[in-house]
Image (spheres, coloured by chain):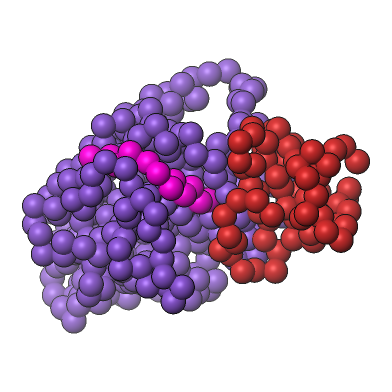
Amino acid sequence: MSTIPRDQWYVAAYTAEIGRELFSRTIGGDPILFWRTEAGEITAHADRCVHRRFPLSRAPSRLVGDTVVCGYHGFTYGADGRCVAVPGQTRVPRTARLAQYPVVEQDSLVWVWIGDPALADPGRIPRASYLDSPGWTTVCGMEPLAARYSLLVDNLLDLSHETYLHGGYIGTPEVAATPTSTEVDDDAGIVYVSRHMADAECPPFYERSTGLSGRISRWQDIEYTPPCLYKLHSRIAPVGSVPDPDGSDPDAFHVEVVYAITPETEHSTHDFWLVARDFALDDEEVSAFLAEQNRTVVLQDVAALDVLEQVIATEPPGYQELSVNIDTGGLAARRMLARMAGAVPAERAVPAR
Amino acid sequence: MSGLPPVLTGERVHRIHWVLGTDRLRAVCHCGAERLFDDPVELWAWLLGHPDDHRPTAGAADRSPALAGSPT
């Protein structure tokens, strides 16, 4: 049985990745072809010709106006996926049509619906409007992960690993040593994990970007909306500083670290990452620094999780994991994902140890 | 209630607070029942078992951790 929840929205790409070139990415095991029409609309269809399955993203397949011509036998498809031309005959079979995927551009991301198109509700796509808003500057990237997506969920829901895996970048002793609070709303589909460090060492990631040094107040508030979007609301401020009663927070630096956790297959994942900040907006040096630092951190995770995938994939069944306090949020996320994938009943779905 | 102020506003939110200065977790059900745990797996089994063994009592949040965590 698949562990990948269907009837869900997933981030398939950055909006800037899709243009007037044929673009393919596999999401949830489905190879999907993306391109923009001459009017600028994104299309998303199965990346397989209905005739002999040749990938339509693969040369010599090509985009001609608002049609895609298969590079194998010339089957030609319009922007709605319907076949408009078949080689050597005038009749186009009625079933000659590419499966179409609901697709939405929002907050600099391309979201695609994997599942029954009739159930696709764009209103269910979680928002991260700061990724594409005035007053914020964002750097981003995407790293391929040769590991199941659930390992990345585990990783991101428990940031105590920063102390050990990312020391010298974002990890300091206080991260692993500070207790968390966890809130879970099954109805809304949110796991929220907070770790507020009142007096912590400033890691290089924030020291170089904010100009603060020495001891800082560092808040980490994780807001995960399974299966795909993970947002880390990070607040960096001088020790003793708290937001004003009206909600304004002029003494703090805010960094929104966003991940889109998109399963490619059962055993591989697209690890999209974005870092948005509300300070030093036009400072290209800060942008380059944060991009390089975060990519390094992501690659440290990728290296560890790729190893873990091999360990899990080759071990005998029945391995008994041990969970401790730091895993409270991760266990909640696992349970929600298992329920979404149909692996457990909706109610008393207790996560595995 | 210990821990940080609540953020989520739904009617059926489960909250888990790592009790400061201890290794224990306080689970708070949306019904008001709460209990201390050493193990997050047992904690989730209890929370998701609502309403079994959930006995919200007036002033539950004011009880000391030791009392709140006593087996029922």
Q: Please name the residue shown 54% across and 71% down the image.
A: A119
Q: In which quarter of the image is the N terminus of chain A?
A: top right
Task: Give the image location of residue A98, x and y in percent.
Answer: 36, 65
Chain displayed in purple: A
Colour in which the image shows chain B: red
Position of A196 compared to B1: left or right? left
In front of the other: A21 or B56: B56
Q: In which quarter of the image is the C terminus of chain A?
A: top right
| Magenta span dominant secondary structure | strand
Q: Where is residue B19 drawn, in percent x and y?
A: 64, 42
| Image position of A206 (left or right of A117) | left
* Residue shown at 52% from the left, 51% from the top: A193
Looking at the picture, tell me which residue is in the foreground, A275 or A78. Answer: A275
Nearer to us in this view, A204 or A148 = A204
Span colored in magenta: A193-204
Q: Can residue B61 be seen in this snapshot?
A: yes
Is residue A33 among the parts visible in the rendering? no
Residue A129 drawn at (x, y percent): 34, 71
Q: In this view, does A286 lie to the left or right of A54?
A: left
Query: Outermost residue toward the left?
Result: A284
The question of residue A199 being in magenta is answered with yes
Name the quadrant containing residue A81: bottom left
User: Which residue is located at x 15 percent, y 54 percent?
Assistant: A287
Q: Who's the residue at 79% across and 38% down the image?
A: B66
Residue A114 in the image: above or below residue A273: below
Residue A163, magenta (yes or no): no
